[in-house]
Amino acid sequence: MVGTSPVGLHRVIEPVGVLPQAAQRLDSRPEIGPDEVRVRVERLNLDAASFRQLADKHGGDGAAVRTEVLEIIRTRGKMHNPVTGSGGMLIGTVEEVGPDSPLGLKPGDRVATLVSLTLTPLAVADGLADWDGRSEQVPCAGHAILFGRSIAAVLPDDLDPQLSLAVLDVCGAPALTGRVVRRYDRPVTVAVIGGAGKSGSLSLAAARRAGAVRTVGVVPTDAERERLAAAGLADEVALADARDPVALAAAVGAALGGPADVTVVCVDVPGCEHGAVLSTAEGGTVIFFSMATSFAAAALGAEGLAADVTMLIGNGYVPGHAAYALELLRGEPAVRRLFEARLAAD
Amino acid sequence: MVGTSPVGLHRVIEPVGVLPQAAQRLDSRPEIGPDEVRVRVERLNLDAASFRQLADKHGGDGAAVRTEVLEIIRTRGKMHNPVTGSGGMLIGTVEEVGPDSPLGLKPGDRVATLVSLTLTPLAVADGLADWDGRSEQVPCAGHAILFGRSIAAVLPDDLDPQLSLAVLDVCGAPALTGRVVRRYDRPVTVAVIGGAGKSGSLSLAAARRAGAVRTVGVVPTDAERERLAAAGLADEVALADARDPVALAAAVGAALGGPADVTVVCVDVPGCEHGAVLSTAEGGTVIFFSMATSFAAAALGAEGLAADVTMLIGNGYVPGHAAYALELLRGEPAVRRLFEARLAAD
């Protein structure tokens, strides 16, 4: 294979010219180009929304779900649920590395992909025979292809792979939070909305490491408040409904002695944009990590409040994000306890 | 009316407790609170995305568009398109000023509102009888309410009001573009997608004033290419479909000799997120001003491309934005000609 594109354009069969994520069908042949990597797949982690749609459609009939997943992968060359538009991630072992691959992987590395399955060429060899179709965790023999600009993290030896995966799934949040806090030329206050969740707890830890002078984690329930307070990851823990702008701003203001310099939105419910803006000081920054964020609500909300705040779309990729998040997990026992408790509850 | 809130909470009918922009319905009664201002409305300027959606929905049937706009204003107490989530702005004359209003307006001032119609209480008295439903410019008799924290600009005497309005409508774009360009500690290249439009041409002028070393305006048609090239507002003018990521990135790369440090998205069509990300250099910034921007497409697109770019939600409010945009219009004859030509064509 010659003339490979770092974003995988050469693997797009149809429609021609779109990026792999937008493609109907990818070429999943195992031969790799000079900057590609082939991974021997061990397990697929289907996106929760995708698995739920398939399970609902087939009324919980695992064999039918398995047949449909196989059919999607066969016809699309990737696990890209056409209804939900979502994919998931995978774990496997690096099998072959092209001479020009910039990913720094070597054969035998056990890796998790940090780009979506919706853009990852994939072929299944075992008919998913070891999967009962009743769980998002799909044992799978086959191969997947990483492009020059794909991202994969080597799974660390010292951590349970499930724990690593849970951290890697949200590793963009702490990396970007830390970067934003460090970019201010003065110590800043930080509010993390949804501070007891996966991305929230990591973001609180990152804010503190980056030099935040005072932090507050905002949570929606008494149970989460107790858990986060016990963890000690934030200077203050506040209880508020993030969808209530006035209540949220009051809670943040009381905890920090005024609006936050940096507000990080980590709750996956719609309608938190105005509260986040109202909780943020003039000249401050709001980072939206929630996929439920409405672009228009944020843009018009800030304008309508005459709020001079910088609003960032939370980019899931920041260089070094995986290593940074794993290091936070190792270095902050409280973060680790929160993650382990959450995995145990799943 | 007592106990008025500077952000207009007292005007929200339902759901209770949200900010006016998030409200389903506002109270547009003409009686003002102590910090409010009532404006006698002269003209509405519908947001381009909103008008396009309405025109498309009704297949260009102006009467049907007018009926729907009237129905939206009647049922919501504001012009807030429920599909696009966007509004627009208005011009009118200040009729009454509450004793505690901080806006510095006086009765008789001719003003443009710089906060969205999506949060401005509005009532129409003439059934929009003078509007044919075929233009974003809506002659309108009625009244609107400004809150303590609303923003309104007095229309300057030296400029045609239509011209001022067109500039003020998009004045957040040049202000934020200029700020982003100035924040880099080195000269940057700037690509403006939709460079021949209102926000686009002002953003190009702002980028140059802020010290951009090279600029490109990307446009979708030959006619716009010729117009922008003749204006001389950009160092290069490129023709590309912004919804085609590969074509867009190639056009920007060819014009600038590589990806842009700062990419400004000013086209109001969906699907431009991936192209904008792909057109931007590592460490660069994308500013999304288009209300058609999908938060998820931007966030997942950047992650899928492993693109270390900062993505900004274009906040329509930057302190001093109105004066800055009017100054660009006065100081850049090419900008003025583009605006005048556009108004003449409407």
Image (spheres, coloured by chain):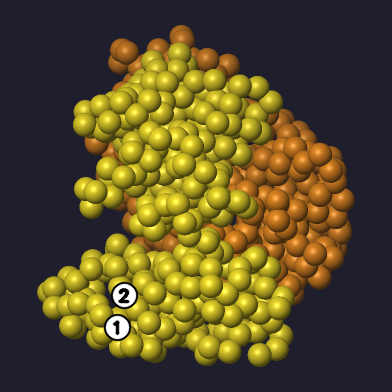
Chain colours: A yellow, B orange
Say which residue appears at 52% left-offset and 43% top-offset: A327
Q: Quadrant of residue B77?
A: top left
Crowd band around label 1 with a 10 angstrom C-alpha radius: few (<14), some (14–19), many (20+): some
The chain holding disc 2 is A
Q: Which mark is residue A139?
A: 2
Q: Earlier in the sequence, mark 1 or mark 2?
A: 1
Please, what is the three-letter code of the amino acid marked with disc 2?
Answer: Pro
Co-location on one chain, circles 1 and 2: yes
* Tag 1 near tag 2, CB within 8 Å: yes
The chain holding disc 1 is A
What SS does tag 1 mark?
loop
Q: Which mark is residue A113?
A: none
Say which residue appears at 40% left-offset and 12% top-offset: B34
The residue singled out by tag 1 in the image is: A128
Residue, far front: A158
Residue, far top: B99
Say which residue appears at 46% left-offset and 24% top-offset: A215
Q: CA distance from mark 1 to mark 2?
A: 7 Å
Locate residue A266 relative to residue A138 in the image: left or right: right
**In-front residue for pair A97/A243:** A97
Q: Quadrant of residue A104?
A: bottom right
Which image quarter holds the N terminus of chain A? bottom right
